[in-house]
Image: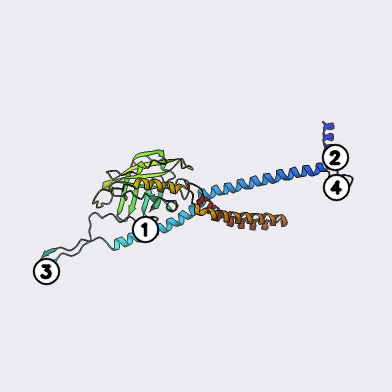
Amino acid sequence: MRYRAKLTEGLVTAANRPDHRGRPSRHSKYHRGVRTAIAGTGRTLVTLGLLILLFVVYQLWGTGIFTARAQENLKSDFRKELKAADDNPVIVAPTTVKPGVTTPTVPHDGPKPPPPTPPEGDVEGTISIQRIGINFAFVEGTSRDDLKKGPGHYPGTPLPGTLGNAAIAGHRTTYLHPFGDLDKMLTGDLIVITTKAGTFVYRVSQPWFKVKATDVWVVDNTPDPELTLTACHPKGSAEFRIVIKAKLVVNQSSRISIMTPFKPGAAASASQQHTLAESLSGQTKSLVPSFVFGFLAAAVGLAWWWAFRRWRLPRTWLIGVLFFLIALFPFYVYLERALPAGY
């Protein structure tokens, strides 16, 4: 063993011994080049791994920053709309009892007419589910931008509290994942929805089941007042949809005037299919900004690397990290929008 160690040491020394002109031998240059290439490849792979890990962290938690801010604004807008509705109650027209005498105008204490459907992206009400601990404002629409704000009401389906199948979609893993725990709901659980027309309580009649992403029949209209909740399934994938079915508890809900049952247009199913596909596809308009901010982040990262090699100080490293993360954040924002499916 001692002889073998000496022999190995001699070979290494010979490989690194300079030639007769004092220059490093070709063997020495070759070994240094291999070691440099291996070290560079390793650093590159580690860096790419860290960047991917940071992007996953952004998707799971960073996207919630936008939703949290949107929820504050939506709930504030909804409170103002409720106050305005209370300040301007629906009244009945005065009627003539006898000539020259009319009854006073009084607030209407009967069932309220359903409010008009708000524009897409605007707040429609709140949804609260005690079983999974959520209380979110929901908007009209299920496009990608709509679902970033919170749960979204399917266009072309009835409003909650009216006859028919009201349907609401939401994310499971990103953007505060409002419907992340739909699979924990049980038969009999209550879902409370508040709109400008009142508060409506639904009881889960069918626990969760999964369907294909193209099975929009789950939001088809029904003759009775029902509610359907949908989200991507399984978590982190858009291959299937998880579905919850619930029925209106009439004696625990506000009364509402229903003139005629809801009848969706002939193109409703096609429109819903298009909306769902659009909400899970990438936004091509985000490709150019993602490339621009990607190059900017790369430039800041290279500048940070060069500065730290020149001045190996903790302060240099910390300042570099700060500027690199600032440049990286908008890159992740646009990259996430450009990629398919927000789940």
C-alpha distance separating marks 4 and 3: 120 Å
User: Mark 4 or mark 2, which is nearer the start of the sequence?
Assistant: 2
Q: Identify the image quadrant of residue 103.
A: bottom left
C-alpha distance separating marks 4 and 1: 79 Å
Residue for badge 4: 23
User: Mark 3 or mark 4, which is nearer the start of the sequence?
Assistant: 4
Expressed as whole percent of the image width and height from the top left, the position of residue 182 reads 41, 43
- The amino acid type of the residue labelled 2 equals Ala
> Which corner quadrant holds the N terminus?
top right
- The amino acid type of the residue labelled 4 equals Arg
Mark sitting on residue 14: 2
| Closer to the eye: label 2 or 4 | 4
| Closer to the eye: label 1 or 2 | 2
- Dot 3 falls on a residue whose secondary structure is loop
User: Mark 2 or mark 3, which is nearer the start of the sequence?
Assistant: 2
Q: In this view, does 338 lie above or below 79?
A: above
| Closer to the eye: label 3 or 2 | 2
Residue for badge 1: 78
C-alpha distance separating marks 1 and 3: 42 Å
